[in-house]
Image (cartoon, grey):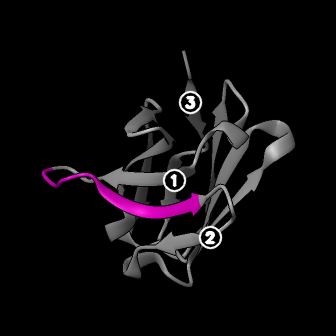
């Protein structure tokens, strides 16, 4: 059973920074892609950024230039560096891992970590 554990959330003032960590219980080489999603109160979960096993990234327009995803394969960990935070970044952030086996798609989610940005 794959487990993803997020950490690093918290309360920060607008303009501040946080770094989220997602630790996987298995080698992240086994995933075709990993990413971060977020869900604000009353809103649908949305993609923040995705990174493929080949290192390609896809950022939401709202976070481009402010957020950076990275991975440490040796530690089976993915990070999300968030700079210049805005109140609208307030949400629960979820780590996601996806793998494709033949025609089947498997996804795994962490429990989420709260990020609150005060104005």
**Of the numbered discs in the image, which one, if any, rests on residue 56?**
2
Q: Is residue 87 magenta?
A: no
- Mark 3–mark 1 Cα distance, whole angstroms, equals 11 Å
Q: Residue at x 43, y 29 (%)?
A: 111
- Mark 3–mark 2 Cα distance, whole angstroms, equals 21 Å
State which region is magenta.
42-51
Quadrant of the rendered image containing residue 28: top right
Q: Residue at x 56, y 78 (%)?
A: 66
**10 Å crowding of disc 3: few (<14), some (14-19), many (20+):** many
**Of the numbered discs in the image, which one, if any, rests on residue 4?**
3
Q: Give percent across and percent down for residue 92.
A: 37, 46
- Indicate the quadrant containing the C terminus: top left, top right, bottom left or bottom right: bottom left
- Mark 2–mark 1 Cα distance, whole angstroms, equals 11 Å
- Looking at this rendering, what residue extends furthest in the top direction? 1
**Of the numbered discs in the image, which one, if any, rests on residue 35?**
1
Sooner in the amino-acid sequence: mark 2 or mark 1: 1
**Of the numbered discs in the image, which one, if any, rests on residue 91?**
none
Q: Give percent across and percent down for residue 85.
A: 49, 71
Q: Residue at x 19, y 49 (%)?
A: 41
Circle nearer the viewer, 3 or 2: 2
């Amino acid at each position: 059973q794959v487990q993803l554990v997020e950490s690093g959330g918290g309360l920060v003032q607008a303009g501040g920074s946080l770094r989220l960590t997602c630790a996987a219980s298995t080698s992240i080489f086994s995933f075709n892609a990993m990413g971060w999603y977020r869900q604000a109160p009353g809103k649908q979960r949305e993609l923040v950024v995705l990174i493929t096993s080949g290192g390609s990234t896809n950022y939401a327009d709202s976070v481009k230039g402010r957020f950076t995803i990275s991975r440490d394969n040796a530690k089976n960990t993915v990070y999300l560096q968030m700079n210049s935070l805005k109140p609208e970044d307030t949400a629960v952030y979820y780590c996601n891992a996806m793998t494709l086996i033949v025609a089947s798609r498997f996804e795994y989610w962490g429990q989420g970590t709260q990020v609150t940005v005060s104005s």
